[in-house]
Image: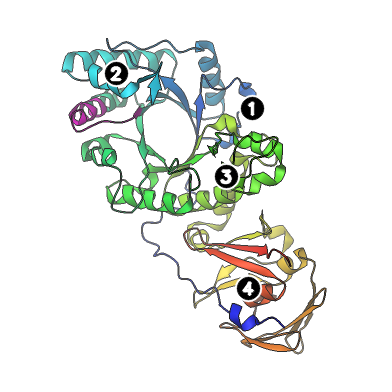
């Protein structure tokens, strides 16, 4: 018989302090989609404007003389602005990017901002562009200032922000993520307090750490902490989420088209449809990151929104579902909500189902509603209210749980829990680990997002 006592462990994990937690589901929570002009040819109607708050139209390229490279599809941009404004969505122009015609755009920025006259001319051109296209702001994507150009960067930010403010428009910036709450890339340290004060918000690029660990949860969490420690307010920090994979550069929508199960995973092995191994963010990770942003930051950003699907596997749609849930719960309850994933799929406890919801008890233990997850794995659940005994049967395994007891029986063998099953609001709740381990499930807890994964063990 399996030694279940070796698996015993209550999900006793304390929450982060509720300070530094942004107002959950705040009305100004941003859902931002980058829209790369030259990379896609998707119908504008495919943009889910009802679920977005901002579009970052990329990229507007500066020229050394202070003028701007004409965008490729001017009428396309006008149509997007019209469609966006009809839906209450703001449109920013993303200024810069990594390279243009094999030349680093940073070199152009350095030249055009090096003196006051050329910088002023450059800002005039930017403002004319913003006005001509009825834009709501500018996203500065200077990748990256150096020690020598730091003062030019600051001058551009401060002066451009002032000009935009005169027109009731905003300036944001694309900035790097960080690997710790106190240490970020050298280029991030060059962004001065004066710059941060001038930005309405920042889009933090929490991706491209490497191929196999492309955009992990911990990177999102430490990046938020870093910019909080730099003085940004929670509501000014927007968490970047990639919709592309590394090292294949496959788009999320194409990975899902190859296999719909890929929507819930973060890895897809190379096959006849996918040329290289692909590491990315699937819907479960996107759900976790959105929850983190709702608790600690002010929004999420997708790069690039055209790489999303327009069906049940939509990343934007899943983000909206998390926001809707947060709005129903309110800030305090959502800050302590546990996300449950069963066999790679989100396990949703909808109010209409009247089956309870996972919660953290007064001892900081994760308590899971008994009936729904066990029924989802095909177990029969019988509750005797008179004795407080719950009998759970699946295949050749029988588990007996008694309300108020810290001992369960697994095929007649006693297994001691570090928590007790309880009845709350007429529903039975259990510490999850030992019960699900008895049925061959592994449990994985993500403290950073307060998420519990229940996954059938291989070979079971």
Mark closest to the chain's N terminus, 2 or 3: 2
Mark closest to the chain's N terminus, 4 or 2: 2
> Comparing marks 4 and 3, which lies closer to the viewer?
4
Real-space Cα separation, disc 4 to disc 1, in angstroms? 41 Å
Return the x and y of residue 187 as percentages of the image width and height.
27, 38
| Residue at point 55%, 38% (across, down) | 245
Crowdedness near tag 2: few (<14), some (14–19) or many (≥20) residues, C-alpha within 10 Å: many
| Residue at point 53%, 11% (across, down) | 75
Image quadrant where one finds the C terminus? bottom right
Q: Which residue is mark 1?
A: 46
| Residue at point 73%, 61% (across, down) | 353
| Extent of the magenta region | 141-158
- Label 4–label 2 contact, CB within 8 A: no
Q: Which residue is mark 2?
A: 108
Q: Is residue 309 visible?
A: no
Which labelled disc corresponds to residue 319? 3
Return the x and y of residue 109 as percentages of the image width and height.
28, 21
Return the x and y of residue 18 as percentages of the image width and height.
40, 62
- Label 3–label 1 contact, CB within 8 A: no
Crowdedness near tag 4: few (<14), some (14–19) or many (≥20) residues, C-alpha within 10 Å: many
> Comparing marks 4 and 1, which lies closer to the viewer?
4
Which labelled disc corresponds to residue 135? none
Q: Secondary structure at mark 1?
A: helix
Real-space Cα separation, disc 4 to disc 3, in angstroms? 27 Å
Side of 85 relative to 60 (left or right): right
Mark closest to the chain's N terminus, 1 or 2: 1
Crowdedness near tag 1: few (<14), some (14–19) or many (≥20) residues, C-alpha within 10 Å: few
Q: Is residue 246 visible?
A: yes
């Amino acid at each position: 018989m399996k030694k279940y006592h070796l698996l015993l462990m209550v999900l006793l994990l304390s929450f982060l302090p509720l300070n530094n937690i942004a107002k959950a589901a705040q009305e100004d929570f941003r859902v931002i989609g980058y829209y790369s002009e030259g990379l896609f040819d998707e119908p504008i109607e495919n943009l889910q404007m009802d679920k977005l708050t901002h579009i970052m139209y990329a990229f507007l390229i500066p020229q050394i003389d202070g003028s701007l490279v004409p965008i490729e599809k001017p009428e396309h941009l006008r149509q997007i602005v019209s469609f966006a404004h009809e839906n209450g969505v703001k449109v920013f122009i993303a200024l810069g990017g990594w390279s243009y015609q094999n030349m680093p755009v940073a070199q152009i920025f350095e030249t055009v901002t090096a003196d006051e006259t050329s910088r002023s001319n450059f800002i005039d051109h930017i403002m004319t562009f913003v006005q001509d296209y009825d834009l709501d702001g500018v996203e500065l994507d200077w990748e990256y200032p150096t020690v020598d150009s730091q003062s030019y960067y600051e001058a551009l930010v401060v002066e451009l922000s002032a000009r935009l403010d005169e027109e009731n428009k905003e300036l944001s910036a694309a900035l790097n993520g960080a690997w710790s709450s106190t240490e970020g890339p050298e280029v991030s340290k060059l962004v001065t307090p004066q710059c941060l004060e001038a930005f309405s918000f920042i889009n933090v690029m929490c991706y491209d750490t490497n191929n196999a660990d492309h955009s992990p949860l911990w990177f999102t969490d430490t990046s938020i902490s870093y910019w909080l420690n730099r003085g940004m307010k929670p509501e000014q920090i927007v968490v970047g989420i990639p919709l592309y994979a590394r090292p294949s550069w496959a788009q999320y929508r194409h990975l899902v088209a190859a296999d719909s199960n890929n929507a819930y995973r973060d890895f897809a092995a190379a096959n006849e449809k996918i040329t290289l191994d692909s590491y990315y963010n699937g819907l479960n990770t996107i759900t976790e990151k959105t929850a983190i942003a709702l608790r600690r930051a002010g929004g999420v950003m997708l790069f690039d929104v055209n790489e999303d699907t327009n069906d049940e596997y939509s990343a934007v749609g899943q983000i909206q579902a998390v926001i809707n849930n947060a709005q129903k719960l309110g800030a305090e309850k959502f800050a302590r909500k546990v996300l449950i994933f069963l066999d790679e799929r989100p396990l949703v406890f909808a109010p209409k189902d009247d089956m309870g919801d996972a919660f953290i008890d007064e001892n900081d233990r994760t308590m899971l509603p008994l009936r729904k997850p066990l029924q989802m794995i095909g177990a029969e659940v019988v509750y005797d209210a008179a004795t407080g005994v719950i009998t759970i049967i699946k295949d050749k395994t029988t588990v007996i749980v008694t309300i108020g007891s810290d001992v369960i029986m697994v095929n007649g063998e006693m297994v001691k829990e570090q928590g007790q099953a309880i009845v709350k609001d007429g529903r039975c709740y259990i510490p999850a680990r030992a019960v699900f381990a008895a049925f061959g499930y592994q449990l994985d807890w993500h403290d950073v997002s307060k998420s519990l994964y229940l996954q059938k063990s291989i070979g079971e």
